[in-house]
Image (tube, rainbow, N blue to C red):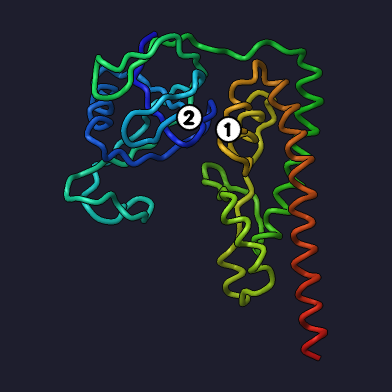
Amino acid sequence: MRVPIFPLSLVLFPGQMLPLHIFEERYKQMLRRCLQEQIPFGIVLIKDGGRFGRSTPHSVGTLARILSVEEMQPGPCQVCGAAGPPGRDVYYHIACRGEDRFRITSLDRREAEYLVADVDLYPDEPAPPPALLMVGRRVSSLFDEYYREVVALMGGWQRSAQPGERTMMFDMATLRAGSARIGSETEGEERARTIVVPTLPEDPVQLANVIASELNVQPHVKQDLLETPSALARLQREAEILAEETPQIEERIRLHYRRRFSEFGRAN
């Protein structure tokens, strides 16, 4: 199978949605090709180099199927509100969904302005259903606890996601900043900071991909999760990560309130 490759500084998992802004000319060409030929493109984490210019991707990625395309005029994005790219050219806001994992067998830098690769699909190795269900239940429980602590760290409230509603994910910089704001908002600001908790699927394979997508970890950790040979192995590693991350967040919350009470005592 031969597909265009889009190296990015993120990891896409099967079944997960991803919005993208396409403003480089080479990727506009890629977009037009995918639409004309009705083919997916491959999203792969950058291993060496940068997004702009020459880069080398990891060998395992995920096919992305384009679901919608909107041509955008220069200026802030009318879809997400983000600042548009510099310049006066039109750009594109696309929504895509992760499909199958693949492994790159060869890269071609000469066929087009963008990378093209020959790839083999990389399906999950089968695992015993009872083991998948057992580990899946444990990971769901750990993730619920983890997300509650994330919400507390951000100083917000949480509610369940409605069908089709996007959830809010945080990067590590946001989480670090959040600890300084716990308890500092007005009532109105707290309501505005309501955090939507993702709805977890019951299917263990889907669950493994949702959890991997939602975790607030470095891209190389997510790449390791993507490359794990089976959904069972992915769930087991996610359980380890959640068990490590949750106590760290709890400790940061305790330290924050300890400092607040100490400051309150000195003020009185």
Q: Earlier in the sequence, mark 1 or mark 2?
A: 2
Residue visible at 42% across and 24% down in the picture: 56
Percent x, y of residue 161 = 60, 48
Residue visible at 57% across and 54% down in the picture: 173
Percent x, y of residue 61 = 49, 22
Disc 2 residue type (three-letter): Leu
Name the residue beneath numbered marker 1: 220
Residue visible at 65% across and 33% down in the picture: 201
Q: Secondary structure at mark 1?
A: helix
Could you say which quadrant of the image residue 191 lies in?
bottom right
Spatial CA distance of label 1 from label 2 is 8 Å
Could you say which quadrant of the image residue 117 lies in?
top left
Q: Is residue 218 left or right of residue 55?
A: right
Q: Nearer the viewer, residue 50 or 77?
A: 50
Percent x, y of residue 121 = 50, 11
Disc 1 residue type (three-letter): His
Q: Nearer the viewer, residue 163 or 10?
A: 10
Residue 45 numbered mark, or none: 2
Q: Secondary structure at mark 2?
A: strand
Q: Is residue 226 left or right of residue 100?
A: right
Q: Is residue 245 left or right of residue 197?
A: right
Residue visible at 58% across and 33% down in the picture: 220
Q: Residues within 10 Å of mark 1 (few under 14, many from 20)?
A: some
Residues marked 1 and 2 touching at CB (< 8 Å): yes
- Location of the N terminus by quadrant is top left
> In this picture, is 45 found above or below 166?
above
Residue 161 numbered mark, or none: none
Could you say which quadrant of the image residue 95 lies in?
top left
Q: Is residue 139 left or right of residue 179?
A: right
